Image: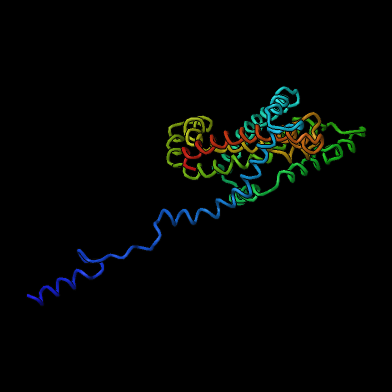
Amino acid sequence: MTEAVREVRAVRGRPGAPGGSRRPSTAPRPSATRLLWALPPVALLALVFLYPLALVVQQSFQPDTGGTSVQPYADVFASEAFREALWTTVWLALGSTAGCLVLGFALALVIAFVPFPGARAVSRFIDVFLSFPSFLITLALLFIYGTVGMANGLWTDVTGAAEGPFQFLTTPWGVLLAEITYFTPFVMRPLLAAFSQLDTAQLEAASSLGARAPRIIRQVVLPEALPALAAGGSLVLVLCLNEFGIVLFTGAKGVTTLPMLVYGKAILESDYPGACVVAVVNVLISVGLYGLYRVVSRRAGA
């Protein structure tokens, strides 16, 4: 009997045995581990991005007279320059987005469905084009359509005129052309991805039933391309609203967008509260449109 009791006590004394003593676990919980891993990037993000953004918001409520007030917002919203800059920014962004959608859809159709030598190289070049800075495209347009560019130089050489007819680059239409040229590949990339997943049997069936190319595009291709068009258009709209380099490099007269207004108030006028107010408005519009872009991209499967 004594021997049996000793065996039972020995078993109960083992770690993990029923009724035995258990040592407290020193391993960190999974949630605590994830929190520890997340702290460094969150702290870096807060230091590099959120803290300067908070300073901009704080400065927008601090007029030059001192104190804290919404007067800078009232002054900016009441100014004609802000309303004109807001309208110019909106119509340029909408016009550029519409142009990119039309041109990008047409070019993507040709690359995806019209066989020609070098189609794959052109498709790969689009990926490289996305990495180009915006001012590089504007500089190329200046070489071609500028006042002393190639097109005007050729015209004056042939006709003997004092100046060429291409003087639109320093107007809003020049900014529109430059933005459409630069941002069209941002629409073509998701479109080409969508076209690559399109079942060609549908196109062959529609063609065998006598449907012409415009009808096939309208009834077969376009419905499949709508999610990609929406995602690409939303992204281009956000990028156009914040574009600064194209407007600056074209030197367009009378074209003042919200980013240009921030630059003018901060650098030229030293109106830092006003510049911060315009920057806050620009950020709010951009964040709202970016949220729309994420929703559309998620529904499109991007």
Q: Please say which color scheme the image uses.
A: rainbow
Q: Position of residue 78 (x, y in %)?
A: 72, 22
Q: Which one is in front, 14 or 221?
A: 14
Residue found at the very far bottom of the displayed protein: 3
Vertically, is 235 above or below 22?
Answer: above
Quadrant (top left/top right/bottom left/bottom right) for the N terminus: bottom left
Examine the rendering and report whether any part of residue 259 can be seen: yes
Residue at the far left in the pictured view: 1
- Residue 235 lies, in percent from the top left, at 59, 38
Q: Please state the total of marks drawn on the protein image.
A: 0
Viewer-side residue, 2 vs 188: 2
In this orientation, does residue 237 appear?
A: no
Say above or below: 13 vs 132: below
For image coordinates 56% across by 45% down, the residue present is: 115
* x then y, percent, for residue 136: 74, 46
Residue in view at x 65 percent, y 34 percent: 280
The image shows residue 166 at horizontal and vertical percentages of 82, 33
Up/down of 215 relative to 300, above or below? above
Residue 14, image quadrant: bottom left
Of residues 217 and 144, which is closer to you in this image? Answer: 144
